[in-house]
Image (cartoon, helix red, strand yellow):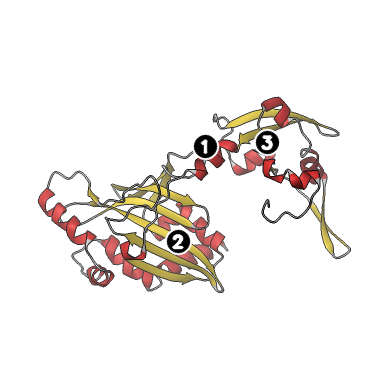
Amino acid sequence: MVLNNTCRCNASANVSSLDLKFFVHHGTLVVQPVGGFNQLLGSDINLIHRLLKNWVTSETGIRAYVLCTEAATEALKLDTTSSEMVDHTETVPDFGAVAVSIKDMHPVYEAKRDVKKFIYTAEDELGILSTEISMPRELVWDYLSQPEFRKILFRSDRQEIIDRKAGRIGPGSTFQCYHGKNVTPHLVLEWTPFERIMVRQPIPFPGGPLTTFIDWRLTTTESGTRLRRKYPRSRSHPTTSSPQRLRVSRTSSPKGSASALVGQEAFSKTTPCQMKSWSRNATLNPALRAVSRMASGGCTNALKSILRTQQ
């Protein structure tokens, strides 16, 4: 906005010093066509417009914020009791006292600006599996992130999320994947809504389990969504000022320690073609065999089966 600004008025001249404010409300409305445009009408529309002029900054000192009405927090199931949300009340003409929750966005901006991304080059990719899904990217994202759908995609008995951040999934949260008595934790390392999920998870391996990294990427295409599943090599590391090395490491295993270490070395040096060969090996774990099924459309079929159950 600063670079493309050609207006010389006071408001435009000071755009670099302005802060963004977001207003979230949940309610009902009426859509009325007026002169070729759709106009939104209703008391809930009037309320959110009147809340734009408020006393939030003068009473709380917060300049950049998200303001959520009580109706919005209930509909979104947000945890307003956390220290990240500030309770506030606005007196609005014709509506009286309106309870709202305020989230300061300056700490969010600072944290996002300094975030350490896991970045790797093409030569660091152990393998890439890709499939085209005839669904909008937002819908595919929901199926990858919601436990009731993930259990179908991962063929698990159930899944649950632990360590939510202020009621939301993010880096540090964990998907617990239950297969009978076995529980596989999928620790979230990267969480960019509608674009990327990167997890660290153990996988079965001859001689002992390994901990590896799986990077899910979503991109919009003409026919829907391209879903990619990438496997970084163990020597991969982010190209940021504060590197976080991606490592393939052995989880604690009282038996087969020597063979597990040998297995890790072999896995980290595996080429994509060798991985494809491994996935056909009946003596190897089901997780690797599932990799080839995704490339042949297994993930697409699973998503389609979920969609049918929702119709």
Q: Name the residue under label 3.
A: 70
Q: Picture coordinates of residue 211 (x, y %)?
A: 27, 51
Which of the two labelled residues, at mark 2 and mark 1, occupies the earlier sequence position? Answer: 1
Residue receiving disc 1: 166
Q: Position of residue 247 (x, y in %)?
A: 27, 51
Number of on-image labels: 3
Q: Position of residue 258 (x, y in %)?
A: 10, 51
Mark 2 lies on a secondary structure that is strand
**Image spot of residue 108 (x, y percent):** 55, 40
The answer to the question of whether label 2 and label 1 lie on touching residues, with beta carbons closer than 8 A, is: no
Residue 176 can be seen, yes or no: no
Amino acid type at image mark 1: Ala
Q: How far apart are marks 2 and 3 (CA)?
A: 34 Å
Frontmost of labels 2 and 3 is 2
Tell me which residue sits at (89%, 63%) in the image: 35
- Name which residue lies at 68% across and 40% down: 17
Q: Are there few (<14), some (14-19), or many (20+) residues within 10 Å of tag 1?
A: some
Residue 292 shown left or right of residue 197 in the figure: left
Q: Residue under circle 2?
A: 217
What amino acid is found at the position of numbered circle 3 in the picture? Glu
